[in-house]
């Protein structure tokens, strides 16, 4: 509870996000790992890396479980302890958290954490079904609701309770597409307008096509070590100074509120407390915008604005690059894409770039404090991490 | 590397293993947790338990992922960090390892680790398919081989290279059924003869029905804390003094040897070194006998006998209750059953009973040092843990 670094990120890697035909998840993961190794020539992977955690959500996409060992081999790290973590779309947020435990334990000084998902070779109906496994089978799936429907319920409540508008939701999409167009690894490389978003087809009212994140192939990783050992591997580490994870009911129907995620609020409180950071001190954030309403709710859950003011915050423009608190400079799940298991550590990758001033056209000026917010399902899991530049 | 306790088990729970009709995995898990809580009245679960790791192998059985948060809620632990770990049949061995990291990290003083699988409501063909996801999709599954076939290849090699016999394999089944009959929670409550095992139908030659473990519903858990805090919760903790985890190629076809699991040898070496324990000092062991040949190979990989002598060891009777090194006093995967995600921490549960002298009819006299050996797939993951009684 003192802001001291818990662990340090000494390198990071990300595959191209998008449609990657003819590759298995393990091959995507190897792309991300190769970048991380190339960025960190002082690291000897086989000698130094002592454990791996890999977020991977769905065994169904490739009829393949046992992902930890599989990708460890393809990463050139045969024989190390390698475990898959799964917490729906927060699978690699949970991998990051598990990796922090491992480094702090003293049993594994250098740990690779990452995530991967290969999705686009499946039909949209199949993907929708596989994603639905992150919701409650007997009380949600069984009745035919899928994730756009669950988030549409939240959006409806938010619009009703706070006067949030569909136009404000569209503005989230416009902002994230603008950012994504500055990120060569983003799935979508095009800007859109509010009108285009508002006139796109309805998926689950009030959510339209442009309110929904993308079905994407991709992988991500970061390499963690003890802060006192970071200098051995890099001159520009990024410190993780706060880590929070919390759970909630699997079913949305059991929650007191549909306009806020309790898990995210709890995880954020833990992370802020550990980091001794206040929301207004955050310079750059990657937020789990699986739907545009999610980003609006997260502004509130993370304390970037008061409850109910998320719509006004996006409308103010303050979360756009160049303004007060740029959110989803990578393009977010909306434009960079959402290969579900890879998303949590892809957010950490963006923090690594931003806080080492390697984010090129989307660099946030003088970014020193960053935050990532990764949500599983309709909020049964959330992880929040806070980062500090060593610059 | 000094034999000091890493963490201490302060309680443990196990559901009845077997066919549990009409229950979801989350309900099975709650049975295990209830026993662990009831055994430990000084623990206030909601106040004390700070994190959970839950081994769960297959989302397909119940069309349900996101298992960590789901079972946390059903365990009465809503809102704590809860992560599913998956490493095929070593999923809860990996949960145990992850829980050890968490306790040692200082971020979570008391951690519940467990595992669960609900399998019997599916047909044997479905279960076989779901289990196969732990093998390599492009190079194994795609060609039609399933786990009995993979282990049959290993058995064939062992029979060829070392003169191990089908009769010796049958003796593993006979011993574990004998033990299982002493365990009221075991799936199978009947003894068998060598003749019965040898004359059972062929599943994948040379493996016959009685060489194969059971398709079972079940859940298990143990509660971990720092050794110096164990006394707060119990007067009879069991210390974990060694922990090893290792990986290998997902595909059997890429291995140098078919008669030994490199991952298990590496994990054992790590655990023995950390525990400062030699194989001959182990008083009781739970071994991953997914097939009878696996137990024979494990005797060798764990150093209970020399390479190739596993068949002779079972034939000597030394691994039976009352003899030198009783193995699988619970009945093992063969007779207690193999609800895949639950197996790793079910082994730890048996160690808790044995090393606190609560194993009733199957109690190993003066058991002070125990070992568990949990294997994922055809050996792409293995975990080995070593335990010491505080008595």
Image (cartoon, coloured by chain):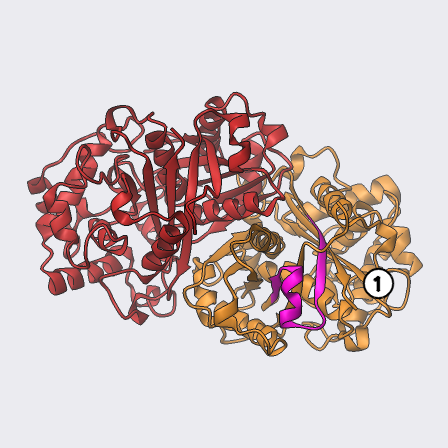
Chain colours: A orange, B red
**Magenta highlight on residue B31:** no
Q: Position of residue B126 (x, y in %)?
A: 35, 50
Q: Nearer the viewer, residue A5 or A251?
A: A5
Quarter location, residue B22: top left
Tell which of B72 and B312 is nearer to you. Answer: B312
Check the picture and name the quadrant holding the C terminus of chain B. top left
Residue at numbered disc 1: A326
Q: Secondary structure at mark 1?
A: loop
Q: Is residue A138 left or right of residue B348?
A: right
Q: Residue furthest right?
A: A316
Q: Residue furthest left?
A: B195
Q: Is residue A238 left or right of residue B167?
A: right
Q: Is residue A31 above or below residue B85?
A: below
**Which quadrant of the structure image shows residue B269?**
bottom left
How many marks can you see?
1
Kindly give the residue lying farthest to the front in the view shown. Answer: B2
B91 on left or right of A237: left
Q: Tell me where residue B204 appears, x and y as whole percent.
A: 19, 56
* Stretch of the chain drawn in magenta: A221-243
- Left or right, B258 with reference to A15: left
Q: Position of residue B100 (x, y in %)?
A: 50, 45
A207 w.r.t. A138: above or below: below
Is residue A350 visible from the viewing direction of this image?
Answer: yes
Query: Residue drawn at (56%, 61%), measured in percent from left and top?
Result: A111
Would residue A24 be seen by someone viewing this image from the given angle?
A: no
Q: Is A230 contained in the magenta span?
A: yes
Label 1 CA crowd tier, 10 Å (few <14, some 14–19, many 20+): many
The x, y position of residue A82, in whole percent, is 47, 59
**B212 and B105: which is toward the camera:** B105
């Amino acid at each position: 509870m003192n802001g001291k670094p818990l662990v340090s990120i000494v390198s990071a890697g990300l595959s191209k996000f998008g449609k990657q035909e003819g590759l298995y998840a393990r091959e995507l993961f190897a792309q991300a790992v190769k970048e991380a190794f190339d960025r960190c020539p002082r690291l000897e992977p086989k000698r130094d890396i002592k454990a791996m955690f890999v977020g991977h959500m769905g065994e169904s996409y490739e009829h393949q479980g046992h992902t930890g060992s599989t990708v460890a081999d393809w990463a050139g790290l045969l024989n190390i302890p390698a475990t898959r973590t799964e917490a729906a779309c927060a699978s690699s947020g949970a991998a990051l958290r598990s990796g922090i435990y491992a480094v702090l334990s003293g049993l594994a000084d250098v740990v690779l954490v990452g995530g991967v998902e290969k999705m686009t070779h499946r039909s949209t109906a199949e993907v929708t079904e596989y994603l639905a496994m992150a919701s409650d089978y007997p009380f949600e799936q069984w009745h035919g609701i899928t994730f756009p429907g669950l988030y549409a319920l939240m959006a409806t409540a938010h619009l009703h309770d706070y006067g949030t508008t569909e136009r404000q939701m569209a503005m989230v999409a416009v902002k994230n597409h603008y950012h994504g167009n500055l990120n060569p690894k983003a799935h979508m490389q095009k800007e859109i307008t509010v009108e285009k978003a508002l006139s796109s087809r309805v998926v689950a009212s009030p959510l339209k096509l442009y309110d929904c994140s993308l079905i994407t192939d991709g992988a991500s990783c970061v390499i963690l070590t003890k802060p006192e050992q970071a200098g051995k591997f890099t001159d520009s580490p990024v410190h993780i100074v706060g880590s929070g994870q919390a759970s909630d009911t699997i079913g949305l129907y059991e929650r007191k509120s549909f306009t806020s995620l309790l898990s995210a609020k709890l995880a954020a409180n833990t992370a802020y407390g550990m980091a001794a950071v206040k929301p207004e001190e955050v310079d750059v954030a990657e937020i789990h915008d699986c739907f545009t309403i999610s980003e609006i709710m997260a502004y509130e859950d993370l304390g970037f604005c008061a409850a109910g003011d998320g719509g006004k915050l996006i409308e103010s423009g303050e979360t756009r690059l160049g303004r007060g608190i740029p959110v989803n400079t990578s393009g977010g799940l909306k434009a960079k894409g959402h290969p579900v298991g890879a998303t949590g550590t892809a957010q950490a990758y963006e923090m690594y770039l931003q806080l080492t001033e390697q984010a090129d056209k989307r660099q946030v000026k003088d970014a020193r404090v960053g935050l990532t917010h990764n949500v599983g399902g309709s909020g049964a899991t959330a992880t929040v991490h806070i980062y500090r530049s060593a610059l």
